[in-house]
Image (tube, rainbow, N blue to C red):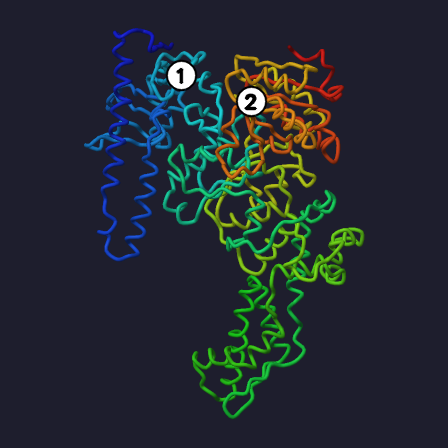
Amino acid sequence: MSRDRTADAGPDDAELAAEVEHLAESRRQLARMRRRTASLDAGAAGDWVSQEVLTASLALRMEQLADDPTVPLFFGRLETGAGPGTEAESLHIGRRHVSDELGDPLVVDWRAPVSLPFYRASAREPMGVRVRRRYGFQLGRLTAFEDEDLGSGDEAGFSEILESEIERPRVGPMRDIVATIQPEQDVIVRAELARTICVQGAPGTGKTAVGLHRAAYLLYAHRDQLRRQGVLVVGPNASFLRYIRDVLPALGEIEATQSTIDELVVAGASGKRTVEVRATDPAAVAVLKGDARMAVVLERALWGRVATPAESLVVPWGARRWRVTADDVAAVLAGLRARGVRYDAGRAMLPQALAHRVLAAMADGGESPDDRVQDAVARSRPVRDYVKQLWPPVDPARLVWALLSDPAALEAAAGGVLDPAEREVLGWAEPSRAPGSARWSLADVVLLDEARDLLNRTPSLAHIVVDEAQDLSPMMLRALARRASTGSLTVLGDLAQATTPWATRSWAEALGHLGKPDAHVEQLTRGFRVPGEVIEYAARLLPHIAPDLEPPTSVRRSRGELDVTSDPVVDVALRVGERVGSVAVIVPDARVEPVAVALHDAGVPFARLGEDRGDEASEFDAHLDLVPASLAKGLEFDHVVLLDPEGIVDGEPDRVTGLRRLYVCLTRAVTSLTLLPDGDLPAELGPPDAVGR
């Protein structure tokens, strides 16, 4: 059973008043904690290194203790029942820990072990909880609470506060879901750091939020390790990263790095941009360059630079000339290759390995050399010249450039791996004179990233969250795999939303390329954001785009609104724009410009998604966004106006990819979806009269 108290219950509702006072006291104590942190003197740390470290730690702590009065400090409470050997306890659950002057907790961090029952407890398994309370807020002001009696043994009924929080209209970037995490989501969030999790999530199931909350949880549970080794969030494009930018900071976490796959491979492990992406490959060429076989081609091209010893190494030393035969040198090379060293590491080790052979010859000749002699021999000109000729230095950009510019070099490296027709289309049509002037594509730079790793091992991070992973090529997945070689990943995606020509065909295949073939795959199908009317209509496409996936279901009571109209897009935008919440006008990429002109001429205020305005906040802070279909993935809007569904399908290289793009666009709506077909709707969706109005 549950009971509800609201702010309208009158001044005699002492319990609600007590909760309001607890919130006020929690804010006062948070301010005290921040003042105390600000008063600490980093100069007392001693040496300058310690001072720098302490200064950075204090600055981080100040950011974590920042208070936003519009965001409640707590959203729930647990009351444990008194039993044999235990005392009754009350815990307020919130986004961060707040304690009073004595150190007693006023708010417990949602990630703490004692908070777990808030998300997992049920009447069947109460986990020691007697009552679970949820709070309702308006602009940070506590206005209501709702209790769930877990001790009664009765399963919980409908929760108005939970539903209103999930369905609350919003304008701006994505927000956290910490108050509404469901049990199946919480299992993923609290998964062990060493475990790689793959989430196949239908639209509206919260997979992106789950991945971000897992990053926040791991930063809490393994802070020292993750701070030292790093956490990375990879998104499909810059607009998506701006959309999710506020989630981790709202949870007090600012130490995770965010990047697109483009930015990651262009910068490389060094973080320094060495080439620019200035070209786009045809789909067939990009698919081939993204094929995992290209890793074999690159490896052969690189190690093919190591020559077969044809002459002995001769080192004059003292009164004699010491010789290492070509066969012995070949044995040294084979030994280094057998150790699996990177190219540059092996090249650095070769002089010492050859010098060791020289010292062995000296010992056999009656000499008594020591380590200083070996070091001197390794640095001698004969050894250095021999190593340079045998194992030459290689620039990764020049290696890839040579493969794509020189058919002979490509044939030598790719023979037996790629067939002649594939080699024919792989090379650049108009090769440049040097790597610096080449028109690199994104697929080329992914190859360059692989080449860098063949030369020098890419440092591994502790954890990577990668969203929309279904759209990554095998070579892109390999780029992430080497950055998680000793760490773990949270892989998020939906095979039904795969819209790149090189998209993965299965999660087993993708996880293999990520180097985590044994990762656990979790399927989320319960939609909390997309209403039933919309998701059921969009699901008509699944037999054509992902027949093996389980259709998603909406758990919301509200069915939402779905309409079809032939009215002009400007009129519909004006009409829908009067509603509360965010609005998106999603259009085929080719029609963005004319629709933008029409909205502007009609005086409709809007922001154009993907447009660089020099102000990150402006992109999602507008009430109405004009969204190219190619940038809609991963985003949510309260109301969506979808122009020319068939045009969205036709904008892709093939019908299946176009239908997947349409599936993405159809499922961006949280409350209402209005279709504006330019002619007929796609046949796969059924006739217009089959649409609920």
- Estimate the x, y position of residue 277 in percent, counting from the top left: 63, 49
- Estimate the x, y position of residue 358 in percent, counting from the top left: 53, 81
Q: Say if 594 sits above or below 470 in the image.
A: above
Q: Which mark is residue 123?
A: 1
Q: Say if 630 sits above or below 40 in the image.
A: above
Give the labeled residue for mark 2: 583
How far apart marks 2 and 1 lie (CA) works out to: 39 Å
Q: Which element is circle 2 on?
A: strand
Mark 1, residues whose alpha carbon is within 10 Å: few (<14), some, or many (≥20)? some
Please state which amino acid type lies under the numbered disc 2.
Val
**In this view, which residue lies farthest toward the left?**
102
Q: Is residue 651 left or right of residue 192?
A: right
- Estimate the x, y position of residue 172 in percent, counting from the top left: 49, 27
Residue under the image location 33 percent in, 47 percent down: 56
Q: Nearer the viewer, residue 425 or 4?
A: 425
Mark 2, residues whose alpha carbon is within 10 Å: few (<14), some, or many (≥20)? many
Q: Is residue 489 left or right of residue 496?
A: left
**In this view, which residue lies farthest toward the bottom?**
319
Q: Which element is circle 1 on?
A: loop
